[in-house]
Amino acid sequence: MTPSDNPHSEQRIMSYLDGQMNASEQAAFEDELKDHPELAAQLELHRRIERSLGKSFPLKGPTDRQMASLRDKYENRDPAVEPRRSQVGPLGIQPHYAALLGVAAVFCFVFGAWYFLSHGPRKPYFEPRPLAELYHDTIEMGFKPYYECHDPDRFAATFQERQGKPLRLEELPEGSRMLGLSYPGGLSRDTTAMLCLVDERPVMVFVDREECDQDGASKNPSADVHVLRRRRMGLVFYEVTPFSEPRVLDHLVAADRPPAGR
């Protein structure tokens, strides 16, 4: 069973994101992320969901005017209109409402049990995104990979597991270097991205199976980057870069042989 299949992975991811792990637990979890791309991808999915929710539903406290209005209503309330204690239950709910809530709870439980048993567990929802957006998001988050994968066998094995093809990175030209690999999605939930610096400017190469290619992947409203595409070996490669020509993409080639099992 892989870490992403472990029923406790979800709880550990939430503990990690919420800062509830001690130093040794956090270090052990981060080492596990380096060895298990699927767990790292699951962690990134949670991060992006939280980030998206934070943008869509920012938490805002009440304004001074709202607080003053609430204080006035409380201080000037009429005790005569307050419900008598005998009319409400222990949680402040009137008896007939409590009965309705009980019926609703039973219905929800029965319906939920039926739906789960008939449909079974489902994978988290995934929606393709333009790769230029993911590029800018990654820069905003510090342009750091999930792990620095400089071991050729581990590098090849990552692409073998996720895209079905072992890849290796040829020596890059002077002024270019790879930082590591990440799993930000884009074309599919298995998309693998390589983060590089070329002349100290951020470049990302996204790789996935050819059948996962998306029409909207090249959508790019920004004038400061280019989205360049290649198809070969049954894979699709996208380089998102500030340069007009690919500087890294063509250096990802087929590995001479499949990597040994890890």
Image (cartoon, rainbow, N blue to C red):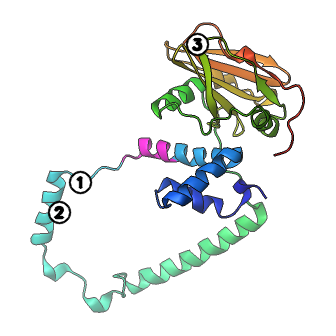
Residue 238 appears left or right of 197: right
Quarter location, residue 116? bottom right
In the rendered structure, which amino acid carries the disc numbered 2?
A: Leu
Residue that mark 3 sits on = 175
Q: Which residues are magenta?
A: 50-58
Total tally of numbered discs in the picture: 3
User: How far apart are the two marked residues, 3 and 1, measured between alpha carbons?
Assistant: 51 Å
In the rendered structure, which amino acid carries the disc numbered 1?
A: Pro
Residue that mark 1 sits on = 62
User: How far apart are the two marked residues, 2 and 1, measured between alpha carbons?
Assistant: 10 Å
40 or 200: nearer the eye?
A: 200
Q: Would you say the residues marked 2 and 1 are in contact, meaning their CB atoms lie under 8 Å apart?
A: yes
Residue at image position (61%, 31%) is 129
Between discs 2 and 1, the one toward the N terminus: 1
Residue at image position (30%, 92%) is 86
Residue at image position (58%, 62%) is 11
- Give the label on residue 70, or none: 2
Q: Position of residue 137 (x, y in %)?
A: 50, 31
